[in-house]
Every structure is written in C-alpha cells, then in structure tokens.
Image: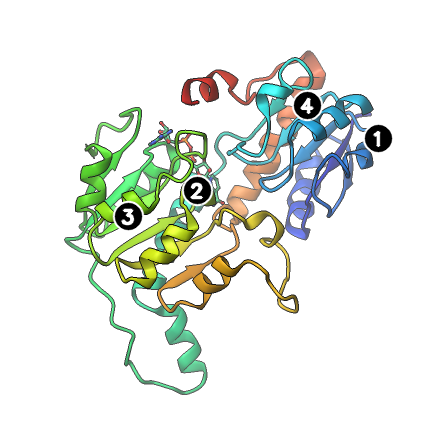
Amino acid sequence: MITISFYDTKPYDKEYFNLINEQYGFTINYFETKLSARTAKLAEGSDAVCAFVNDDVSAPAIDALDKLGVRLIAMRCAGYNNVDIRYAEGKIPVVRVPAYSPHAVAEHAMALLLTLNRRIHKAFLRTRDFNFSLNGLTGFDLHGKTIGVIGTGKIGAAFIDICRGFGTRILAYDVFRNNEWVEYVDLDTLLKESDVISLHCPLNPSTRHMINAKSIDKMKKGVFIVNTSRGALINSEALLYGLLNEKIGGACLDVYEEESELFYEDNSTAIVKDDILTRLICLPNVIVTSHQGFLTGEALTNIAATTLENISEFFADGSLDNQTLLENSKKLI
Ligand code: NAD
C-alpha cells in the first residue's frame, strides 16, 4: 500500500483527490501545514509527498524527506519555481502537472481585467447598498485596444484566443515563437505599444522582476498589467510606484511575490505587516485575488487525476513522464 503525505491542503483538495483516489486506493495523509525542512518529518513512513505552489521544497526540505526515505515528490501544480530541482536531482525525482486547464487561468485573467476595467467589484458593493451612482466607474472599450501577451505557452495561447473575441490587436513576446497565429514583437515594442500587458511565462532567473522600474518606464501611460503567473515576475515596489505616479492605470494580480505566508489563509483579523501589499490593496485601481486562477472543478479534477497517475506510474514501473525539467531551467539560467 502506497502512502502519500499531502501538504498545504484545503477542503477543495481533499474533495477532488478523495474522489479520484477511489480508482487508486492510496493511503493519503492530508496536512494543512506547508512543507518545509521543519514540517518534513510529518511525512515519516510515506512513500511520496504531494506539495503545492507555496510549499518550501528547497534543499533542506529535500534532505529531510530523503532521510525519511520518501521516494517521490509530486507537485500538484504546473510551476515549480519553489522546488530546488538541481538539488533534488539524483536524490528524489520530482513530477508535476504540466497542464490541467489553461482555460481556467486564462479565463481568470480576463475576468480580472474586465472586473477592474469596468469596476464591477465597486458596482457590486454599491448596488448592495442601493447606491446606484455611476460616478467613478468609467472604464474603456477593450475593442480596438492593443493587448501584449508575454509567454505564449498553454495559458498565454488560451488568453490570446479569448482576447480575439473582443476585437483587440494582440502583440506577443516569447523566447520561443511557438504560436503561428499571433504577431510576435520584441519585448520593448510590446511594452511600448500595449494598452494591457498580461504575463503568462514561468518564474525563473531570466524572468524574475521582468516588470521593473525600467520596463514600466517604457510602457504607455495608463497601461493595465495583469499577472496570473507568478508574483516575482513583477518588482512589486516598482509596480506600486508606477501606480502612485499614475503611469500604470490598473493592476490585476492573482499572484504576489511575497504571497506564500498570506495567500490561501484568512488573515482578516491579523495585522498584515507587508506594507507594499497593504498599499496595493488600498488603491482603487488594483484588484488582488488569492492565486485562484486554477480554481475550477475541471482544473481540480485534472490536477488530482494527473498527480495520482504520476504517482501510480512511478511506483508501478519507475516512469517519470511528467518529471520537472532540469535541462530547461539550466537553459534559462
Ligand atoms: P507553458 O510552459 O505552456 O508556457 C510558458 C511560456 O513562457 C512558454 O511558451 C515559454 O517559452 C515562455 N517563456 C519562458 N521564458 C520566457 C521569457 N523569459 N520571456 C517570455 N516568455 C518566456 O506554461 P503555462 O501552462 O502556459 O503556464 C504559465 C505560467 O502560469 C506557469 O509557469 C505558472 O507560473 C502560471 N500558472 C498560474 C496559475 C494560477 O493559478 N494563477 C495556474 C497555473 C499556472
């Protein structure tokens, strides 16, 4: 019987994993706590560990799991910037879910953009109070605007398809020009010409803080920035400055570079010490969601199915079809 320890689990994880696990019959121990070197010992007796985007899968945690005899780390997400895959190599294989529903994240990116641009979140609060004033709710037509998409992989491509329906001009930037239906330009042109910039590339050393004071300087005044990828693609201090001096017209953030201690938890009675996030959230032209782009029934079903299949295959015959790609990260560093 294979035992798996799940870290950072929420009720929706249990619901979907328990359902899919009926086909596999694994023993699953769900922990609410995040994985770290300190909490790794909870996995004692487990064959595999299942972790998520804000778990700390750095070298000390990998060492701790290795000492306990854990044989596989199964990430139940696509991104793996929180895993030291160089260090894990030769110790514990790491698998992930490369695709589960690009539409879930792309649709969330568009939902954020429409919500912020048309002030739907403000209108909802107003009308609940029978305040039917429209003052301050003016948005802009997306039709005819230029949308810059950085990263044209699975989610970027789905976002581009959605944008086409709005009659927008789409500019794309990617290190690999992998979408034949879109106009690729260099990054500077995209920054200069876009009314909306949406980020869909992974976080790695070459993309960390790709949106910074210098790149913001090159953007159009009033640009909207949408980030559903990873928080550290944006230097948050530069973003805040750009919003305060009105260079940036709006920010739609599903991710934040210092999210790991805050997101997915109810901090409503805590004194949040992160001044940048606090100021961002207070601005009328910023909308923050708690890394929920993936949160659809379809995506959760696919995540559970692929994760448990990754684990099943590994313990059946050592297959690692969805292993995290060290050679890719080497290329990018
Ligand atoms: P993908 O691998 O299909 O596509 C990523 C694209 O980024 C590729 O085309 C790649 O060539 C490109 N890229 C890599 N480095 C680049 C660079 N320096 N500049 C420009 N482009 C670059 O990945 P995907 O499935 O589309 O996911 C994209 C990202 O979305 C993930 O890495 C993850 O961080 C994020 N994500 C977020 C959520 C969420 O819930 N908000 C869920 C899933 C994924």
Q: Which residue is tagged 1?
A: 44
The image position of residue 269, as x and y in percent, is 66, 69
User: Is label 2 or label 4 in front?
Assistant: 2
Q: Residue at x 51, y 51 (%)?
A: 292
Distance, label 2 to label 4, CA atoms, is 29 Å
The image position of residue 40, as x and y in percent, is 77, 34
211 left or right of 139?
A: right
Which kind of residue does numbered mark 2 sit on?
Answer: Ser
Q: Is mark 4 within 8 Å of ligand 1?
A: no
- Residue at the left extreme? 144
User: Is label 4 or label 1 in front?
Assistant: 1
Q: Upstream in the sequence, badge 2 or badge 4?
A: 2
Identify the secondary structure beneath mark 2: loop
- The quadrant in which the C terminus is found is top left
Which kind of residue does numbered mark 3 sit on?
Answer: Ile
Mark 2–mark 3 CB contact (< 8 Å)? no
Q: Which residue is tagged 2?
A: 229
191 left or right of 281?
A: left
Q: With respect to residue 69, does 134 lie above or below? A: below
Mark 2–mark 4 CB contact (< 8 Å)? no
Mark 3–mark 1 CB contact (< 8 Å)? no
Q: Is mark 2 within 8 Å of ligand 1?
A: yes
